[in-house]
Image (spheres, grey):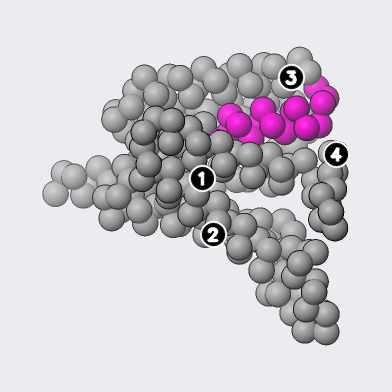
Amino acid sequence: MKWYTIGPLSFPASWAAIGAAFLLTSLYFVIQRKKVVADDMGNAFFIFFLIWKLSVILFQFSTVIKNPLMILYFNGGWKGYALGMAGAFIYLCVKVLRNRLNSSLLVEAWLFSALVYELAFYLLNARHILMGSIHILGAILFFLWTRKKAGQTIWQLQLLILFTCFQAFIYSFKGDMLSAPMATYVAVCGALAATILTERKRADE
């Protein structure tokens, strides 16, 4: 994986791809004139970034106490990444349960952000062109299919599960089944499925 440097900060391509996914997903909903969703996606990105950066305090407390400037140059690594993603997704799920968002929009947002992430990751790493093309094409088809089924939550839940299986298939070919991105796909699929079913149960009551 390639690394990039901006000033004193060095970061892998995957983190740049995550940033692009959050930011472009917000822009997508701004273009769709769904400002509420765009605002919530922006807030989710801020929560993710804040937890990811500050989690270095949690995991390297004694070192940070001795050298507080570590917070500027370091982060919580993959543990901090997991906590940040969990915090961002919990925030979005709470918005769904409070009827500010609906799960259909959240599924659409997730598939769009996944598409942007994978596209940005392949572009930044410039490798596996054939596999990347198949991967991106598949992600685009799943995203368009999900948009077509907007509002049909059970359909979207099935597509979400199929999309996660598709990701697992692609990642297995790359030898990355036990990677952080694949773990993220599985975890988000489970959390979204629980959110969709909870929302439907509340609607039926």
- Mark 4 — residue? 2
Q: Position of residue 89 (x, y in %)?
A: 48, 52
Can residue 178 be seen in the rendering of this structure?
A: no
Q: Does residue 29 appear left or right of residue 124 in this picture?
A: left
Q: Nearer the viewer, residue 89 or 64?
A: 64
- Mark 3 — residue? 131
What residue is shown at x 74% (from left), y 59% (from top)? 77
User: Mark 4 belongs to which amino acid?
Assistant: Lys
Within the magenta stretch, is there residue 116?
Answer: yes
| Numbered label attached to residue 188 | 1
Question: How far apart are the two marked residues, 2 and 1, measured between alpha carbons?
Answer: 16 Å
Choose mark 3 or mark 2, whichever is in front: 2
Q: Is tag 2's residue or tag 4's residue first in the polypeptide sequence?
A: 4
- Mark 2 — residue? 47
Q: Secondary structure at mark 3?
A: helix
Choose mark 2 or mark 1, whichever is in front: 2
Q: Which residues are magenta?
A: 113-128
What residue is shown at x 70% (from left), y 75% (from top)? 57
Q: Does residue 32 appear left or right of residue 169 in this picture?
A: left
Q: Are marks 1 and 3 in contact (CB under 8 Å)?
A: no
